[in-house]
Amino acid sequence: MEAPSERQQTLSEFFAPGKARRVWQIILAVLTSLMVIGAAYEFTKPKPEPARMTHASSDDTYSYVDVVLLSDWVYQVSGDENYTFYETMDPDGNWLLVSLNEKTFQPLRSHVDAYNAYFTDDYMNYSYPEPTRLSGMPSYISYDDISELCEYYGVTFTEFDEIFGGYYLNEGASNADVNAVLYLIGTVIFGLFLLAIVLQTSAVQRNYRKSEQRLYELGKLDEAETEFSAPESVFIPKPRLILSKQFVYCGSSGWVLQYTDIGWTYLRTQHSYGVAVGKQIIAGLADGKTVVLAAQSVNDAVLTDTAQAIYTANPNCLIGYSFDNIKLYHQRVKEYKQNHPK
């Protein structure tokens, strides 16, 4: 612990965002902006020229299929029109599977008619339409899907692979979609961290302004500023807590409180999945509001110093968490509100 005079800070400077917080805010803002720009670029940049899809195509190559024959759907995942497989043949007689949605499928009805005609005795005399090019990304056919398709066609896994290969064309997909998703994920992650810092900083500043306004109305603002830098005031660095003769200055939450405003103080242990991850010193005010006095690096020594400072100036303050203190505190709050109607 040390005296606050060694810090050479004013009261408003004490509650201003620290240098590290400002730096992180700038870094996260820049990273979030770069992620947004990257996503926008991926969505708008020209697509590369697709390569012709074959059974040997890989899933990282933007590809196309020139459709001559197209079946009605042969495999469909219920509720997902984008996961509907169709059988197609290209001009070289290669059979492939493509995944189409209903909007893309409907204009291709002439190819469906050609498919049906192809399996008739008069297929040589049919006037087949010009090929229609579909582009997208080859996607691996999962084991479950191949099992269903093998059962549909009545073939073995090996025979299925020889006929259709191990990939289907995911029509409309592109590398840009994959890259854009990564940028969007980055935007969300960095944006959430940035938002958390901004909201916490705003909360501290808002609480400080409320405290300052209340102290001004009570005629105590000058005393609070004087005691803030008084040599006898105790500064506890890690929780950013200052204990003066009449006031507690809470750097982590922005509150400046008179000890006489505090009706109850206790230690709260935070748990995550049953494991204690942190401790906070909580104050219940006379009007029933709850504020955080210290939110980090809280230990028994910090709790003892804080409780002692509050109790010395306000012997009526309840110290510690117990059912008796809960009951008595709520009773006092009720009496306070009856005596101080809004």
Image: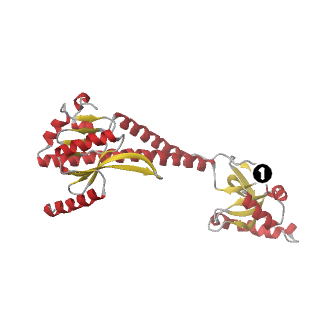
Horizontal side of residue 293 vs 147, given as left or right:
left
Q: Is residue 222 above or below residue 284?
A: above
The residue at 13%/49% (across/down) is 217
SS at mark 1?
loop
**Of residues 224 and 96, the one drawn nearer to the viewer in this rendering:** 224
- The image shows residue 185 at horizontal and vertical percentages of 52, 48
**Of residues 118 and 317, the one drawn nearer to the viewer in this rendering:** 317
Query: Which quadrant of the figure has residue 228?
Result: top left
Q: Which residue is mark 1?
A: 54
Q: Amino acid at mark 1?
A: Thr
Outermost residue toward the left in this view = 219
- The image shows residue 2 at horizontal and vertical percentages of 26, 30
Q: Is residue 177 above or below residue 222?
A: below
The residue at 68%/54% (across/down) is 135
- The image shows residue 214 at horizontal and vertical percentages of 17, 49
Mark 1 crowdedness (10 Å alpha carbons): few <14, some 14-19, many ≥20: many
Q: How is the image coloured?
A: secondary structure
- The image shows residue 157 at horizontal and vertical percentages of 82, 58
Query: Which quadrant of the figure has residue 254?
Result: top left
Horizontal side of residue 164 vs 106, given as left or right:
right
Residue 68 visible in rendering: no
Horizontal side of residue 270 vs 258, given as left or right:
right
**Of residues 284 and 211, the one drawn nearer to the viewer in this rendering:** 284
Residue 64 visible in rendering: yes
- Quadrant where the C terminus sits is bottom left
